[in-house]
């Protein structure tokens, strides 16, 4: 196996030197955090200056940060630099109302680019590759994050963004694309619609796919690899920690190396907040170590995974995470978009003709995810004929689409016809294959 590094000394650094790098990074992040309105208040009584951090043991003195904290800090509660030094911001994709915002200075963007370049090198990409980036560009961090990292490595980038499958396939053929970045669902979608667009696998020169943005199993990876005759690498990130380039698989594909010079990784018991043992599943908590504009300390990601014990044959000492096994909250990821059941409820409950009962069904439609919202109509609206209600159906569909950014299928049901719950309601039925 050909193992390449961006910076072998740093990637294979011994753990005690990595501890020192992390301690210095944590001191820096605390210094930055104390300049923000949010952390100046939050850290009171816990940590009052970077000197309070003498070793990584002092991390425990810092309270956790949650998604709600970030929302409540909208727009500039967690901004540690002057506006004039900020060169970009990203807001989160699927949120209930208020989004979260992450600012970047030029240095922050350079660091992010460096981590993405490192990730690509770790998976064996080189400047001879041709990379078609099929992730959405814009506020979603998947597009731009990969883009800059690949350019830095000297790769020819084709910035197609998502969708328009026929054009994607044509470009893949014409420019002999060797690398793609897409959600696993989109890889399946491409494979299943290739023939109808007039292409076959032998038209392509594809070698690798980076798949991420949504949970997927080892079987999904294998299927993608077999369908396309390629290697597929898992890419993990979240917008609060920049986006992609937080954890990435090396050529051995034995788990996601977390770039620990840039992030402190903790895996905790979501109830007690205590660290769990390696190999045990817990909630991932990240702390930024190098970000100037928006430092984030001990962020509860709500993603569940475990640290893979042992060392990777590639020689990197940065620990590996397992696949994401689920989430502590109820966020659904539908074709890569984050959707909270509470968003759907909020919209439905605003419509006067809607009753109180509804169900959210998520299933597979071919390779893609499908969202169906079943809604009981209000008894005052129901006059015995469901066929009169086409306008209402469209109204609900449009309102949902405007809020969650994806197009659900809406079914109207007679009053009293959906399942009733005596205990806590279980309104979400997700029949997609579980990990
Ligand atoms: P966003 O902030 O919109 O980029 O969404 C980030 C979330 O997407 C993460 O917290 C995970 O829940 C999910 N996610 C991203 N990459 C992966 C991956 N490779 N496997 C599983 N889930 C992922
Ligand atoms: Zn490795």
Image (cartoon, rainbow, N blue to C red):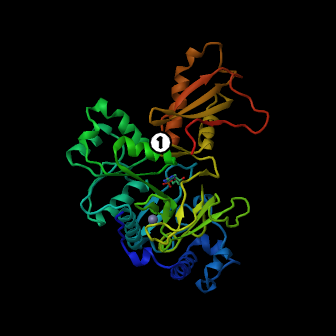
Figure label count = 1
Q: Quadrant of residue 187?
A: top left
Percent of width and height locating residue 322: 55, 57
Q: Position of residue 94 (x, y in %)?
A: 52, 48
> In the rendered view, would you say 11 is above or below 66?
below
Taking the image as drawn, is residue 397 in sight? yes
- The residue closer to the viewer here, 214 or 206, is 206
The C terminus is located in which quarter?
Answer: top right
Question: How many C-alpha atoms fall within 10 Å of the one at disc 1: few (<14), some, or many (≥20)?
Answer: some
- Hey, which residue is sitting farthest top in the picture? 384
Front one among 281 and 289: 281
Q: Is residue 376 above or below residue 249?
A: above
Q: Nearer the viewer, residue 278 or 72?
A: 278
The percent coordinates of residue 229 (x first, y second) are 34, 45
Q: Nearer the viewer, residue 112 or 254?
A: 254
Q: Is residue 3 left or right of residue 354?
A: left
Instruction: Give the image quarter of residue 164.
Output: top left
Residue lying farthest to the right in this orientation: 422
Is 145 positioned to the left or the right of 389 in the image?
Answer: left
Q: Which residue is located at x 26 percent, y 63 percent?
A: 127
Which quadrant is the N terminus positioned in? bottom left
Look at the numbered disc 1 and give the secondary structure of its residue: loop
Q: Is residue 331 above or below residue 421?
A: below
Q: Position of residue 130 (x, y in %)?
A: 26, 55
Beta carbon of the mark 1 residue lies under 8 A of ligand 1: no
Judge left or right: residue 192 versus residue 50.
left
Q: Which residue is mark 1?
A: 335
Horizontal side, residue 108 vs residue 157: left or right: right
Regarding residue 243, the answer to whether it shows in the image is: no
Q: Residue furthest left?
A: 174
């Amino acid at each position: 196996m050909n193992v390449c590094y961006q910076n072998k000394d740093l990637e294979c650094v011994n753990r005690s030197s990595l501890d020192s790098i992390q301690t210095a990074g944590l001191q820096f992040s605390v210094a930055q955090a104390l300049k923000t309105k949010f952390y100046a208040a939050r850290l009171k009584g816990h940590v009052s200056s970077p000197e309070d951090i003498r070793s990584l043991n002092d991390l425990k003195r810092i309270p956790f940060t949650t998604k709600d904290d970030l929302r409540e800090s909208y727009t500039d509660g967690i901004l540690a630099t002057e506006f004039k030094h900020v060169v970009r911001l990203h807001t989160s994709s699927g949120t209930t109302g208020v989004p979260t915002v992450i600012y970047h200075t030029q240095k922050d963007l350079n660091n992010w680019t460096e981590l993405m370049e490192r990730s690509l090198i770790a998976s064996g990409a080189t400047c001879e590759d041709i990379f078609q980036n099929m992730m959405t560009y814009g506020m979603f961090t998947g597009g731009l994050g990969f883009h800059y990292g690949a350019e830095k490595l000297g790769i020819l980038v084709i910035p197609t963004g998502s969708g328009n499958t026929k054009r994607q396939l044509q470009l893949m053929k014409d420019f002999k694309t060797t690398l793609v970045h897409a959600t696993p669902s989109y890889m399946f979608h491409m494979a299943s619609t290739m023939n109808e667009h007039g292409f076959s696998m032998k038209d392509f020169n594809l070698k690798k796919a980076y798949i991420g943005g949504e949970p997927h199993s080892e079987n999904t990876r294998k299927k993608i690899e077999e369908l396309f005759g390629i290697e597929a690498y898992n890419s993990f990130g979240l917008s609060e920690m920049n986006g992609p380039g937080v954890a990435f698989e090396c050529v051995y594909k034995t788990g996601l190396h977390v770039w620990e010079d840039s992030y402190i990784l903790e895996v905790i018991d979501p109830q007690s907040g205590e660290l769990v043992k390696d190999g045990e599943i817990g909630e991932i908590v990240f702390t930024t170590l190098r970000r100037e504009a928006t430092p984030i300390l001990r962020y509860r990601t709500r993603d569940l995974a475990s640290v893979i014990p042992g060392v990777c044959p590639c020689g990197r000492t940065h620990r590996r995470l397992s696949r994401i096994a689920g989430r502590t909250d109820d966020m659904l990821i539908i074709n890569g978009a984050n959707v909270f059941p509470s968003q759907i409820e909020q919209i439905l409950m605003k419509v006067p003709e809607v009753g109180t009962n509804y169900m959210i069904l998520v299933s597979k439609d071919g390779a893609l995810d499908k969202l169906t919202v079943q809604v009981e109509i209000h008894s005052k609206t129901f006059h015995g004929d469901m066929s009169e209600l086409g306008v209402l159906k469209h109204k609900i569909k449009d309102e949902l689409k405007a809020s969650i950014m994806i197009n659900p299928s809406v079914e109207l049901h007679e009053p009293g016809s959906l399942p009733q719950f005596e205990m806590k309601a279980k309104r979400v039925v997700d029949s997609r294959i579980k990990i």
